[in-house]
Image (cartoon, coloured by chain):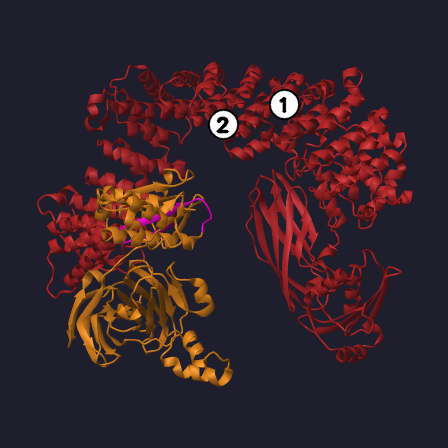
Chain colours: A red, B orange
Amino acid sequence: MPAVSKGDGMRGLAVFISDIRNCKSKEAEIKRINKELANIRSKFKGDKALDGYSKKKYVCKLLFIFLLGHDIDFGHMEAVNLLSSNKYTEKQIGYLFISVLVNSNSDLIRLINNAIKNDLASRNPTFMNLALHCIANVGSREMAEAFAADVPRILVAGDTMDSVKQSAALCLLRLNRTSPDLVPMGEWTARVVHLLNDQHLGVVTAATSLITTLAQKNPDDFKTSVSLAVARLSRIVTSASTDLQDYTYYFVAAPWLSVKLLRLLQCYPPPEDAAIRGRLTECLETILNKAQEPPKSKKVQHSNAKNAVLFEAISLIIHHDSEPTLLVRACNQLGQFLQHRETNLRYLALESMCTLASSEFSHEAVKTHIETVINALKTERDVSVRQRAVDLLYAMCDRSNAKQIVAEMLSYLETADYSIREEIVLKVAILAEKYAVDYTWYVDTILNLIRIAGDYVSEEVWYRVIQIVINRDDVQGYAAKTVFEALQAPACHENLVKVGGYILGEFGNLIAGDPRSSPLVQFNLLHSKFHLCSVPTRALLLSAYIKFINLFPEVKGTIQEVLRSDSQLRNADVELQQRAVEYLRLSCVASTDILATVLEEMPPFPERESSILAKLKRKKGPGTVPDIEENRKERNANVNGGPNHTSATSNAKASPPSFVGDLLAPAPPPTNRPRPVSSASFLQNPLTPLPPQAYAIPLAASAGTFYQVAAPAAASSTDLLGLGSSTSLNSTPPAAAPPTAASLLVDVFSENSPPVSAPAHIAVPATAAPAADDNFSSITTKSFHVAESILADVQEPTDKFVCKNNGVLYENQLLQIGLKSEYRQNLGRMYVFFGNKTSTQFLNFASNVVCQDTLASQLNVHLKPVDPTVDGGAQLQQIINIECVSDFVEAPVLNIQFRYGGTLQNIAVKLPITLNKFFQPTEMMSQDFFQRWKQLSAPQQEVQKIFKAKHSMDTEVTKAKIIGFGVALLDGVDPNPSNFVGAGVIHTKTTQVGCLLRLEPNMQAQMYRLTLRTSRDTVSQRLCDLLSDQF
Amino acid sequence: MIGGLFIYNHKGEVLISRVYRDDIGRNAVDAFRVNVIHARQQVRSPVTNIARTSFFHVKRANIWLAAVTKQNVNAAMVFEFLYKMCDVMTAYFGKISEENIKNNFVLIYELLDEILDFGYPQNSETGALKTFITQQGIKGQHQTKEEQSQITSQVTGQIGWRREGIKYRRNELFLDVLESVNLLMSPQGQVLSAHVSGRVVMKSYLSGMPECKFGMNDKIVIDKQGKGGTTDEAGKSELGGSSGKQSIAIDDCTFHQCVRLSKFDSERSISFIPPDGEYELMRYRTTKDIILPFRVIPLVREVGRTKLEVKVVIKSNFKPSLLAQKIEVRIPTPLNTSGVQVICMKGKAKYKASENAIVWKIKRMAGMKESQISAEIELLPTNDKKKWARPPISMNFEVPFAPSGLKVRYLKVFESKLNYSDHDVIKWVRYIGRSGIYETRC
């Protein structure tokens, strides 16, 4: 505050501040401040009016105290009074206080606005500046409302001083940022553009900032600014640095303005007018030329300013991406920076080069710097720069240099920082796959990768190796050999063991001819690693062993011995135990033919987008990888030879979802096996011999889900349900299944699913991909999958919701629908959660509820509208309000429509709204119960059903189900304690229906008798149907 | 155990730093400064855990004492030690201030070497320490070998707090009962909480190795004696109640290490061999039947938004023959006070802007008297809608009796070897009651 310190320097303030600074402790400071505050209060309260000077002094003190962190709750009025003073210093302090202290909802705002208006209207430029600064500093909506019209007027008025214009432009920029809706676009917009021609460079600089912001929002309105900006830029660039007087910074002409103009130009495509275009090219060339000139000063500011302009020019060149010569020159310039002493410059150069590498014109030019970049990777001290170098290597990689780059990255990986290792691993894996001509090289690379950085190799990477090895006959033998050799290392990573187990289990026979890798040697090698591995890996190894039994009958005895050992058969882990038991029996019981069929080699995987790439994208966030992705598509044709998966990538992307769910989406560990319900009973006493039929069920099932790297979700489920969406799948013909296994298999599922087309099941391991798990389990719990792109038949409302209110209603690879519902009397509210399982947005998302026929009059269902887009990975909540008018049987259908990746998806699900939801439990005594029971004795009021138990007859479970059904469970009513008795009232809008029920289990016969008496026959029938399905 | 001990001034500069264990690094010093002394929010908790290191601190004036440890130590022990450390320093060089600490830093390091060993507290008895850590370094050379060995045997012996062969021409002892009374009272005069924390401080100048026995009107002891050793339940307990006026119920107490705790546990008698010089014999706390020396009656009236009228009456509530001293009543004023007029009949009253309070001081006041003050407070209207929270009126005073009602019944001295008896010892007893936090809501 130069104006304050001299002339009328406020002594009192200076003394006060020095007092505060001399305070020994916090307490002393607070005491001093309290004293000062009391003094100021008494001064403000005093009867005689204060002169401007003292007011200014006290307001200043208050401001100082506030800035020290104390609350100030008075003095605002005095500050506002200062605004109307004619002295600059007083006005300044007043504005300072207000911009710091006054919040927008203060009742003083009207007075303040008035004072500001007066100052804006005054002819005094300093006052106008103060007022504009205050508006910009506060920047509240109220300010914007009051002055959004005035500020542009001042900005474009002909007679405004330059300094005021400058402030006005920045003030408008601020208002535009805080409340864009309030700043009207008017005729002033056209005139703002002409400020670029202003004589005063300060005005131009301020205006450029404003125009850039505005142009980003409405590019069309400001198109004319391009030619003006180019003209201005060329004048600056070509001018000798002396003619700009104040705006030359360390021999660089107006660097800030240049940078801003270049930014502004980046809002637009290259100018179409040839003359302008030529002039711009000339400018950019000049800037590039200047970079070559020897520096005019040794000062760091000089080079910083120069480089700032240069880098902005390069980003403009990259943005335009149209002038090959410029791009190449830019690339060469950046190449020089790669070896510069300044770390920041090296970083920026690498970063810019990454974007340059994606341009078709400069890709080759970037490639020439490969040695330097590799060198940077090795010698650079700063980890962030190394990271950029890795990015650049990844970006510049193509078929010609892939081997070199991958090798360099691998060697760097050994010493790389832990923070970036996983990313490098993914990049190496992608590059190796993408540019592999020779798949032996690919296998070597990935095995090396696992050896060097096993901990950082994610599941997806090794899934991918296996997919590729299985899909390509020519490398299988080589892969088996290499894996076998790699496994001989005394300490190898668990991921290697997994790959080894899988590959040897599949293709061990290809190397069995060599006595050094005879079947027994292979088995012993694998088994030597067994005890060092985690449970999922062990499970995988057990599967490999059973595969061995098929491949090499000669080691059958050894393997059976291993399976039979206590550490397997009685393993604490239920998964391992089950596998051991089942595989042992399988190897004993099944004939070699069956064994060969069940344990056949894995069929090729369907082609799909590389899951690793998706993972890298997720890791880096959007925007960093896509350019490479684009490249890849472009170069697809020439880069990859032969029938390969890259081409499939685009297919998979274009034809949506049935397959893309892939490895990534649900991604449970591959060894996690779906466990059919029926095998549970089998497990309970694994050592007692069972009749063969009983055996066959779990066996077939387990054989079916063999490796669990199995079955894309939709594919298997659609097959199983026989819904006939065969359009998308079965690229592989299902293996011919032995009839026995198949029919048994149907048994496993027939319990709750509609008839299944028999041959389907063995196709499940055949289509082998991980993640069948949730799929299977959901089938067994009777939730049904509906394949996308087909408006599937509406499924029965899942009866699992009869006795509970929350759960997953529906799930496929794209969408998961969860439910949460609550009911009171005849009203209900249901929260439906739509979870987007993909990483892509769902567009045009809409849902509605259809009540068919009579249901519409029986049930009022009202949906709250929801947002039409669901972001990737996000969850959308929709509320459904339900009112029950009278009793009903049908369930309303929820129709969902959305667009995913260009395809319209339709899904229809029945909402689990059942009559029993409107139950209110009623507690009653024994006599009451029997009295009512007798009252409801009319024949049509009673419904009785005798049925066989579907689940085990556990008393506690039954109790829970009855309570979940909605009635009160009455103890001590029925003379037989094993019977269950319940009572409740169903509330509908029109009537209330009392309901009594009795459930008599018969343990010996595994039967139930259910009796229901209600005052309405339809209700009795419906409730009986609902409840009897639960036991 | 304590890993290190640091002393800081108010700015957070380290004055003393003594590290006892290797697990405490240099950065611990800075961690405490940054996270506690210079913390953005004031740190209220005396224990702070920073990066698995615990800091226990106490503050004396502007000085911070911090004990540091990485282990799970007994926090009460650490604080007891820190308090002891303060006592020792006070005994050596008076007030604990930055200046004093800077002037005595050699002495402090010497003390720290002696009272903590590898982080375990050792002898912290000032009397004993003074025999071998002296402020005049030269004096040590005059100590004979015999004397030195005597010190060793005393410090390492069973009675570490007293050396043998002390002789006084006049056997004398002083007993001070110091109490501080804490009160929170509602505006209507209802006691919301009240307790007395007291200390018995003794200064003894006795020859030889005297055995002392201290008796006071502890309810349990009195009841026991009232029953005369026989167990005559119901009627007697009624009798005990009648003697309640003379006896007091002590809620809890702690003793100096010289007191034989086993004897206290079994017979509830306090017997000990006293250290030489001044020490604190016991500390105690009572919550029942407290004599409140003063009653404060506040009257606050708000006249409009800009004026406040306050009238406060204080009544002394003890024997008219006694005189209370150093009476100070502190009446908080609102934060937007712009002017105060005070009228009081007795003493002096002043508005202290720096403390946002009216302070009324009376030098002396006899029992069963009353006095009053009235003040008019002018307020400045603010745009802050918050209502004034009306903090309580607090009071300070000193009275010559024990508000808990504690009485010293006897202090007997037995010295079998030397030829002086209990009657020859000159004994002085003094009671001082001070205000702790003595507040009345208004």
- Residue found at the very far bottom of the displayed protein: B235
x, y percentage for residue A598?
83, 33
Which residue lies under the disc numbered 2? Answer: A417
Q: Secondary structure at mark 2?
A: loop
| Residue A301 vs residue A525, the one in the foreground | A525
Quarter of the image where one finds residue A762: top right
Q: What is the CA distance from the residue labelled 1 to the residue labelled 2?
A: 20 Å
Which residue lies under the disc numbered 1? Answer: A446
| Image label count | 2
In percent of width and height, residue B128 lies at 31, 52
Instruction: Give the x, y percent position of residue A329.
Output: 40, 16
- Against A74, residue B267 (above or below) is below
In reply to whether residue A369 is colored magenta, the answer given is no
Q: Is residue A599 visible?
A: no
Give the number of the disc on residue B107: none
Tell me: A942 left or right of A41.
Answer: right
Mark 1: secondary structure: helix
Asked whether residue B279 is in view, the answer is yes
- Quadrant housing the C terminus of chain B: bottom left
Horizontally, residue A21 falls left or right of residue B238, namely: left
